[in-house]
């Protein structure tokens, strides 16, 4: 499995991955999330142009999962991470998060943040296993508060949501975590005000 920056001609493939990953939400009584549209191509193109969109690829260099990130209050914020169900339980989501952590560490960014559903197994509980911690409302930065307001306006608060943060440690430890935790469920998360977790669906 290789992690690299997404190419312009692969942006439509990211939408396919997100739609497929979203189907998992039907199994937990959240069909509205499954039916939500993926990010438009022009929005994905902006992440590509900013150098904040990465894909995991198979042996044929075909994308199997992706992650896009914003800068929010000085930290890398996981806007969306999705893994195609055909490639679930192979640690791909965790590898994408590890890659973002490596990028952050290399440029002095102190933490990763995201918003996600509190009670969906492959959302907040999964991110706890990836080293994230839930933030109390008093710990939210202005940027995270703005994201949560947009999510509420989008109707996401009909299900409990949380903000999470992962303070970064040494890359040797991060790589060990990737190797030790292969095999988690993949899926999609919703971190954006679309309906993520982004963050979420990772495995």
Image (tube, grey):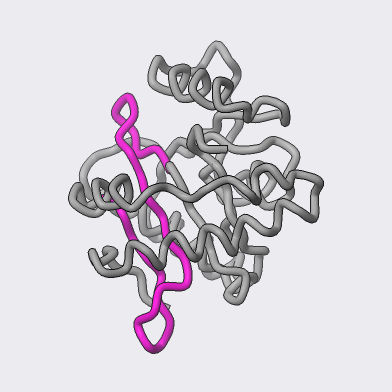
Highlighted range, magenta = 52-78
Residue 201 percent across, percent down from the top left: 59, 54
Rendering quarter of residue 74? top left
Q: Residue furthest top?
A: 138
For the question of whether residue 101 can be seen, the reply is no
Q: Nearer the viewer, residue 180 or 161?
A: 161
Q: Is residue 51 magenta?
A: no
Q: Nearer the viewer, residue 27 or 105?
A: 27
* Image quadrant in which the N terminus is located: bottom left
The residue shown at (70%, 58%) is 24
Above or below 37: residue 73: above
Residue 63 percent across, percent down from the top left: 41, 73
In this rendering, would 32 be left or right of 112?
right
Q: Main secondary structure of the magenta part?
A: strand
In this rendering, would 78 be left or right of 105?
right
The residue shown at (33%, 39%) is 70
Residue 4 percent across, percent down from the top left: 29, 68
The residue shown at (61%, 76%) is 86
């Amino acid at each position: 499995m290789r992690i690299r920056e997404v190419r312009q001609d692969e942006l439509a493939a990211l939408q396919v991955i997100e739609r497929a990953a979203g189907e998992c939400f039907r199994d937990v009584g959240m069909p509205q999330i499954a039916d939500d549209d993926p990010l438009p191509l022009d929005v994905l193109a902006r992440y590509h142009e900013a150098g904040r969109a990465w894909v995991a690829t198979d042996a044929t260099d075909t994308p199997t999962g992706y992650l896009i990130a914003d800068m929010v209050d000085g930290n890398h914020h996981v806007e969306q991470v999705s893994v195609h169900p055909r490639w679930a339980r192979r640690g791909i989501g965790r590898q994408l998060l590890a890659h973002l952590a490596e990028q952050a560490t290399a440029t002095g960014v102190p933490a990763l943040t995201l918003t996600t559903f509190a009670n969906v197994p492959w959302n907040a509980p999964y991110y706890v296993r990836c080293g994230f911690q839930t933030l109390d409302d008093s710990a939210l930065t202005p940027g995270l508060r703005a994201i949560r307001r947009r999510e509420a306006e989008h109707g996401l608060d009909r299900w409990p949501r949380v903000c999470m943060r992962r303070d970064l440690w040494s890359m040797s430890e991060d790589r060990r975590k990737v190797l030790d935790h292969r095999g988690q469920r993949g899926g999609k998360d919703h971190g954006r005000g679309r309906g993520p977790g982004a963050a979420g669906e990772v495995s």
